[in-house]
């Protein structure tokens, strides 16, 4: 059976990326992706990551929180979820930030993502 190996990241939906990136940088978080003008930014948080995702200002976002867990086999984990009667939000896909991943929604609507870094030989493009 596929297994979770560790918590990779927590993603927060923010109203203003510039304000939020400045806030986390002032706390000493090292930005590794995105920035004040981006719709998605990522920071080192020890061996894990803190991600910021721009929401629609003034509108209630469909998600406000996402936890990302690394697993040993994304496709097998997806198949196991489907076999358990869980309907993922989409099939596993490769991301431009070099991870293979998919999301599910828990019973309260929180997004839970399962991912694995791609090996350099797995990265297309």
Image (spheres, rainbow, N blue to C red):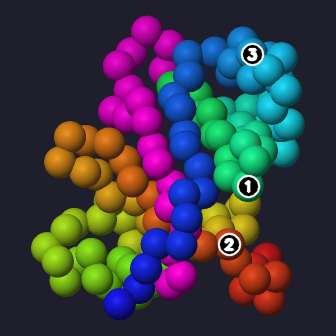
Q: Residue at x 55, y 40 (%)?
A: 11
* Closer-to-camera residue (30/57): 30
Residue furthest toward the top? 58
Foreground: disc 2 or disc 1: 1
Could you tell which of marks 2 and 3 lies nearer the N-terminus?
Answer: 3
Position above or below: 68 against 5: above
Q: Where is residue 119 drawn, in percent x and y? A: 75, 83
Could you tell which of marks 2 and 1 lies nearer the N-terminus?
Answer: 1
Q: Residue at x 53, y 32 (%)?
A: 12
Q: Is residue 65 visible?
A: yes
Numbered label attached to residue 47: 1
Position above or below: 66 against 16: below
Q: How many marks?
A: 3
Q: What residue does disc 2 label?
A: 117
Q: Point out the image quarter for the N terminus.
A: bottom left
Question: Chief secondary structure of the magenta span?
Answer: loop
Q: What residue does disc 3 label?
A: 23
Gap in Å between the C-alphas at discs 2 and 1?
A: 13 Å
Relative to 9, 112 lies left or right? left
Q: Point out the image quarter for the C terminus.
A: bottom right
Q: Is residue 124 visible?
A: no
């Amino acid at each position: 059976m596929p297994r979770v190996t560790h918590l990779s990241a927590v993603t927060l939906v923010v109203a203003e990326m510039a304000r939020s990136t400045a806030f986390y940088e002032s706390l000493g978080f090292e930005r590794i992706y995105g920035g004040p003008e981006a719709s998605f930014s990522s920071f080192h948080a020890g061996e894990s990551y803190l991600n910021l995702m721009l929401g629609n200002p003034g509108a209630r976002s469909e998600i406000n929180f996402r936890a990302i867990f690394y697993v040993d086999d994304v496709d097998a984990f997806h198949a196991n979820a489907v076999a358990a009667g869980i309907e993922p939000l989409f099939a596993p896909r490769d991301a431009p930030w070099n991870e293979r991943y998919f999301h599910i929604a828990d019973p309260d609507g929180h997004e839970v993502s399962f991912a694995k870094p791609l090996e350099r030989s797995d990265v297309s493009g």
